[in-house]
Amino acid sequence: MKTMPNTAISRRVVLGGGLAVAGAALLSVRGQAKAPAGLPARTVAAASGEKRVSLVAAERTLRLMGADRPASRVWTYGDAPFDLVRLAQGESLAIEFENQLPEHTSIHWHGLRIPNDQDGVPYITQAPVKPGERHAYSFTPPDTGTFWFHPHCDTAAQLGRGLAGVMIVEGDETRAYDADIAIVLKDWRLDVETGGYLPFTTTRGELRAGTFGTVRTANAEIAPRMELPAGGDVRLRLLNLDSTRVGSVGFEGMEAAIIAIDGNPIAPFPLREWRFGPAMRLDVVVRAPAAGAEGRLMDFFAADPVTLATFVGKGDARKARAFDPAPLSRSSVPEPKLKGADRLSFAFATASGGKAALATSADSGDPLAEAMLDSLCAASKTNWSINGQSWPGGDHSRVPPPLFTLREGRTYVAELTNETPHVHPIHLHGFTFKVIKSTRADLPVHFADTVLLTPNDRITIAFVADRVGAWMVHCHLIEHQETGMMGYIRVV
Ligand code: C2O
Ligand code: CU
């Protein structure tokens, strides 16, 4: 294991080690200091309205399987897994990033509508951050909600080792909750005897529904028990940061309502089961159990439902009024104007029917051409395609053109068609889209940055292309992304 970076130590000293509670839930209890307990202290307020965050990607050791089981080597951005950055809407972030990993990386800010040059995609929006290098990101997240961040090349391995963080932009609440907890769901491909990793990808998984982890965790613990203020209304921010698993989440023993999808407010409605694919987030309000009683977060997808976390009511019961969660405040995402909108269509398919990546001429000096020289960023195999194009792998001299070129400021209505028998969580960088309808899934109209496209489904989305640049479109099932199901749109 590498030595702890000095920056991490000084950060703790500055902020007080008391804020860091080892292995605890990402818990913020009302009435305490703004910095939530249970988190590594991540932010230092600098000039007013700006937050400085230091993230150091490095290998660290963690006992994912429990205190008495072998430890695993994880890759994280800070001392604790799934570092959490919390800020208020309108605050700007200055992120000082340092790469202490043995390979290059970068940070993509998933779901944030920020300028293209901050989007963190190697070769497309920035150079990779090489081992030992630093990189500064700065932006002002425009929207409230629950977001996350992660690398964008060699993702199966980097995210597979845990390299991901959570970002919460506050300011959407119209009624205070009794607690606010982020719950990161992620499986790990561990050899349970040694704590080492099994191969992150398999040929079988790449061609089908992906390669599943062997150890399921919530906040890097197997089925943790978390205390909630008894009878309180608690905001749980669920994040699926797994590379592969599409679950169906719900609660037992607690009332629950969905209040936001991918961070975007929606009029509260009861949560029974929600198909929850990689990269998706779901904000729910639950009525915490009475003192001593229990409730559970479940994955109902398998024939035998799995308990992901157990919640125990603690303390004096809050006044019991009927469970009636308040809506969050309005989002700041621009509303697409469907009348007169331009149309796009994206067909997600296997590569066999499609042509191999069609190429434009590879001009020298084209950063995309350089990308193809880098094995961490190029597909090793081509299994999947979007509109007949696969994100190129083998031929390093060729570069795909954008899937579409869009005009800045216009509204686009896009049809996403699944021509495969597999589920694909489809993500568009840079824009929060409105999910208008699905031919197969019973989805409410909602805003999202990732939508689950089930077999033979056709989903209609709309968004305002309000920022120029090259924006990735891909499946967030990482083995699909990394074997061809990726492309980009260019907004000019
Ligand atoms: Cu989380 Cu390219 O995305
Ligand atoms: Cu996919």
Image (cartoon, rainbow, N blue to C red):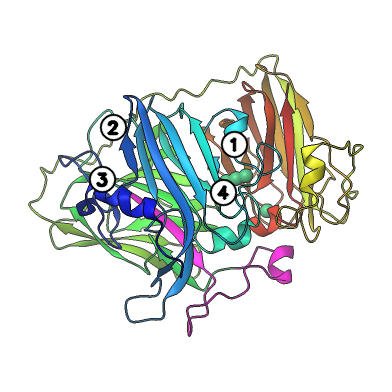
Residue type (three-letter) at the residue carrying disc 1: Asp
Q: Earlier in the sequence, mark 2 or mark 1?
A: 1
Residue type (three-letter) at the residue carrying disc 3: Val
Q: CA distance from mark 3 to mark 2?
A: 37 Å
Residue type (three-letter) at the residue carrying disc 2: Ala
Q: Which residues are magenta?
A: 182-211
Residue 400 is left or right of residue 452, and the answer is right
Which residue does the numbered mark 2 point to in the structure image? Answer: 326
Which is closer to the viewer, label 2 or label 4?
4
Q: Earlier in the sequence, mark 3 or mark 2?
A: 3
Circle 3 sits in a helix, a strand or a loop, which is it?
Answer: helix
Which residue does the numbered mark 1 point to in the structure image? Answer: 119
Circle 2 sits in a helix, a strand or a loop, which is it?
Answer: loop
Which is closer to the viewer, label 2 or label 1?
1
Residue type (three-letter) at the residue carrying disc 4: Glu
Q: CA distance from mark 3 to mark 4?
A: 24 Å
